[in-house]
Amino acid sequence: MPPVINSEDCIKCNKCVELCSEDVFYGSKKGEVPTVTYPEECVHFNGCVSVCPVPGAIKLRIPLPLQLVYWDAEETPQIE
Amino acid sequence: MQVERIKTDVLCIGGGIAGIMAAIRAAELGASVVVAEKGNVQYSGCGRMGNDHFETYIPEVHGSDKDAWIDELLRTAKGEILIGKNLLRTQFLRAYDIVKLWDEWGIPMQYKGRWEFAGHSFPGHPMTHIKYRGRFQKKILAKQAKKRGATILNRVMMLDLIRKGNRIVGAIGVHTREEKLLVFEAKSVVLGTGKCSRLYPSLTPGWLFNDPHGGSQTGDGRAMAYRAGAELQNLEMPQRHIGPKYFTRFGQATWIGVVKDMEGKPAGTFVKKPDRRYGDMICEVNKLAPEQYTESGKGPLYMDCTDITDADYKYMMYWMENEGYTAMTEYMEAEGIDFRKHPIEFSTYPLRGGGLIVANEKAETSLQGLYAAGDEAFGDISAAAVFGYIGGENAAEYARTVNEPVIGKDNPIIKTTKRLIDDIRGNENGPDWRETNIALQQTMSDYVGKVRNETLLKQGLQHLRRIRKKTRQTLMAKNPHEVVRSIEVLNMLEIGELTFLMALNRKETRGLHNRPDYPFTDPTLNKAHIISNIKGNNKLDWKSY
């Protein structure tokens, strides 16, 4: 569930915890890798990703129900 | 529970574009200012990740005949107007001052050294919106507020206004991470709390936070304004938007493409190929087009950017970043989804709650010392910035004329709030806020949804009142975060009930208020529909705009 933190890369600065307006990291402790306590309250605006000083330490995983619907001509379904 | 007391001249509730602009202006005029923000001001409200369009009149571009320009705008771009024209005129005439200020503060309002007008306009008609680099606007505005001495309190949710006579003298709130009540004694209050976003179901069944507003705009301001006795307007007039499916986002005017069906036939008549200057105005003329196509067997509809030039593609991606689309564009890149190759399906988004807190062109509400701006009163970025600024100015001036309020420790609102929180924390085996929110959403959607009539509305209202009563008695939360979510859902239940009452009282069909039992639009109701709470009783009224 979004967001996903790579605990090896995370420098525990807690900037994502401070910024998130939905407070999905509620209960996270200073100086520790943040806990994604309320992942279903993520609104996928990328605030946490944009504020993270280590590229790749935090990523959004876009959940299946929110995937874009798009047409790809190469995948045109064939019906025999 | 710990109670903290804070004295201030001006209290800004909500630190979005409107609230932070109010704080900047009030502090500039010498008032002491506190901004109480539920999240973090650097990243809250609809402008949190940026914006790229700002509606404004620019004298050197539009010429000196302001009225002709405004009239043209009212005829075309604005569509049906459910607010007073004097508000629109004020916005248009003051917006340019804000543009200059923002540019000075470090929000670049020009593109390559010129005013860049694009989007939100019809080919051949006056251009109304400049493109601006709004990606970091919230951070920059928060810095400006602090620079002028405003105190910013992040993670504070306000619950209720405190009234003495006809005057607002303060407010009470909770900390969202600590067990703490905050009582504000304020000479004036500016509400900039946003819309009510989780009232109706999202595009994804059961997924409460697939909402282009974000998830924390839950009608808190209008609910507390109503409880304090301020007038609310047109809550029964819902809105719908259009955008990418299922990754819901506003900002359709940032897309440079043509809305087409599977055969490549455009849904509108405004553009035939992607045009960086105009986008496709069908998205604004008929937001229901995707739904209508699907229901009539012609769907789906796509935003098709595949014919875009390389230069326009780069231009669009630059503005998408500023409009706050990075989560979507980064996801697209990772998945190999390409605007130049793949038409992206567009959807009509579900109903969302409409209406506002009544505020005039000075941002004054019907209560003394209470101001409202932004989506809570009259939205879009430009209007939020203009009326936030005006609200801050008038709130500061009002604060100079009144005595310092004193709120006793046995004030009934303090007691009621404490009791409410103790009840929610003490309940066991009741519903949590999610369960209540889903029950509310299905009731709104089924009984005051796309089709309404008297019997549906009456039945729905009965059901909602039962849900509301049960919720108040049994709602439970296990920590301060869940207390906040619980109070949000209680506010939404309040707004939901008022929506029913207003829908029953509007005996006509108008816009998305579709009443087959009153199928015609009644021209005598071209007025503001008002609800207010007079000592516990609802008063419904019609007033001229």
Image (cartoon, coloured by chain):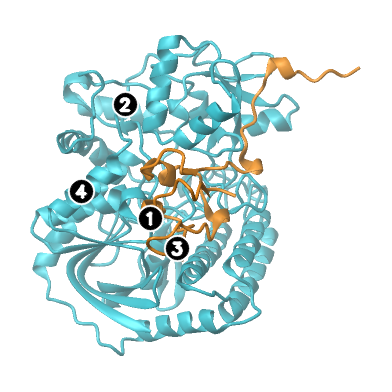
Cα gap from disc 2 to disc 1, whole angstroms: 33 Å
| Circle 4 or circle 1, nearest the eye | 1
Cα gap from disc 4 to disc 3, whole angstroms: 26 Å
Q: Position of residue B285 (x, y in %)?
A: 50, 28
Quarter of the view holding residue B446: bottom right
Cα gap from disc 4 to disc 1, whole angstroms: 20 Å
Residue found at the far right of this picture: A80
Number of residues whose C-alpha sits closer than 10 Å to that of mark 4, classed few (under 14), some (14–19) or many (20 or more):
some
Cα gap from disc 4 to disc 2, whole angstroms: 22 Å
**Hue used for the chain lettered B:** cyan
For the residues bearing labels 1 and 3, Cβ distance under 8 angstroms: yes
Q: Amino acid at mark 4?
A: Lys
- Name which of mark 1 and mark 3 comes first in the sequence: 1
Residue corresponding to mark 4: B143
Q: Position of residue B526 (x, y in %)?
A: 44, 46
**Does mark 2 fall on the same chain as mark 4?**
yes
**Hue used for the chain lettered A:** orange
Dividing the image into 4 quarters, which one contains the N terminus of chain B?
bottom left
Q: Amino acid at mark 3?
A: Ser
Residue B131 image label: 2
Residue A14 image label: 1
User: Residue sitting at 43 percent across and 65 percent down?
Assistant: B223
Pick the front one: B309 or B359:
B309
Cα gap from disc 1 to disc 3, whole angstroms: 8 Å
| Circle 2 or circle 3, nearest the eye | 3
Cα gap from disc 2 to disc 3, whole angstroms: 38 Å
Q: Amino acid at mark 2?
A: Lys
Q: Amino acid at mark 1?
A: Asn
Pick the front one: B392 or B540:
B392
Q: Chain of mark 1?
A: A
